[in-house]
Image: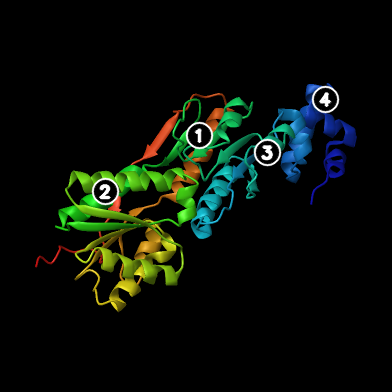
Amino acid sequence: MVKITDVARHAGVSPSTVSYALSGKRPISEETRLRVEASIRELGYRPHAGARALASSRSNVLALVIPLRTGIHVPVVMRFAVSVVTTARRHDHDVLLLTQEEGEEGLRRVADTALVDAMIVMDVQLDDPRLPLLRSLDRPSVMIGFPAEADGLTCIDLDFRAAGELCVERLAGLGHRVVALVGSPPEVYVRQTAFAQRVVQGFTAAADRNGLASSVHPCEAAPAAARAVAERLLREQPALTGVVVHNEPLLEPLVDAFEQLGLRVPGDLSITAICPDELAESTRVPVTSVALPAAELGSRAVELLMRKLDGQDVPDATLLAPRLTERASTAPRNAP
């Protein structure tokens, strides 16, 4: 690893002069500064983060706030995290990952210590307690998710309400008249997590608009829970022929549970889902789905943040339109 003393020796100056060239703390001649910069480039020296911060008043670090609460599907969350980290590195920024449920306290801690230049905040609730602090901070932020009141904030997300509607519209277009939503774990709804609430809103609105009988069933993300909810659905809605799944770990267990109960997918029961394409494609019966564009959302959130850091104007709201891909899990309803 190249050290500051190596740069000093190569440039023919003292280590303190190299430090001054990096930090701007003391004036040095233009000729000396250029010579130091040339040595830095030639040797591939990467200044310590503290020196960079002194020179630019920035830490070149972004905070990614993902409280790993119960009911969160970690593999999908990590898709967002990988995208954020990868995009941040293209802008020469590192990422500080905050996973504890600390609310305002965690945000204020990193803001007050100047650890980060800006923040990306996930797992947004409709009435999120972090909003007043985010509005008051002198550091820019972007939320992946939309609270009920987003004034004064920069938010980006999939249009989850439209996603729920699109799944139901597809089932209605295939002739299905009785549908159900197997949703996120109950605690996700108790917290009023924004994306889950909006899927329910879209599902219910589209079902009502098309005159469909419908019901919503939060469900734990476990195979035993999938079997239990499948049994309950068939007991309470014996004419059920269409299901929307918004609970990634349940896709395969639900298909198995319904088939064990005597329903063929898609012959007797059509299933749609909101999930990453890779997951929908890999199930035993590939599932018709609305893609969850985690990589695009993470990347675009960082790009918005970079523009804000550069003093550029950005849109307050960015909603990605849902995209449905037809696969083997949906078919026209078998009319009696």
Residue 280, given in percent of the width and then of the height, sits at: 36, 62
Question: Disc 1 marks which residue?
Answer: 304
The answer to whether residue 166 of the structure is visible from this angle is yes
Q: Which of the two discs, 3 and 1, labels the residue nearer the N terminus? A: 3
**How far apart in space, not on screen, are marks 2 and 1 (Cα)?**
27 Å
Badge number at residue 105: 3
Residue 60 shows in the view: no
Q: Mark 2 or mark 4: name the one nearer the start of the chain.
A: 4
Q: Determine the residue located farthest toward the front in the rendered image.
A: 236
Task: From the viewer's perspective, tell me whether residue 71 is left or right of residue 269.
Answer: right
Q: Name the residue under label 4.
A: 25
Residue drawn 47% across the image and 26% down it: 151
Classify 44 as above or below 21. Answer: below
Neighbour tally class for label 3: few under 14, some 14-19, many 20 plus, Cα within 10 Å: few
Classify residue 327 by image quadrant. Answer: bottom left
How far apart marks 3 and 4 lie (CA) works out to 33 Å
**Relative to 257, is 63 on the left or the right?**
right
Of circles 3 and 1, which is in front?
Answer: 3
Per the rendering, the mark at residue 166 is 2
**Position in image of residue 305 (x %, y %):** 54, 34
Three-letter code, disc 2: Leu
First of labels 1, 4 by sequence position: 4
User: Please, what is the three-letter code of the amino acid marked with disc 4?
Assistant: Lys
Of tags 3 and 4, the one toward the viewer is 3
Q: What element carries label 4?
A: loop
Under mark 1, the amino acid is Leu
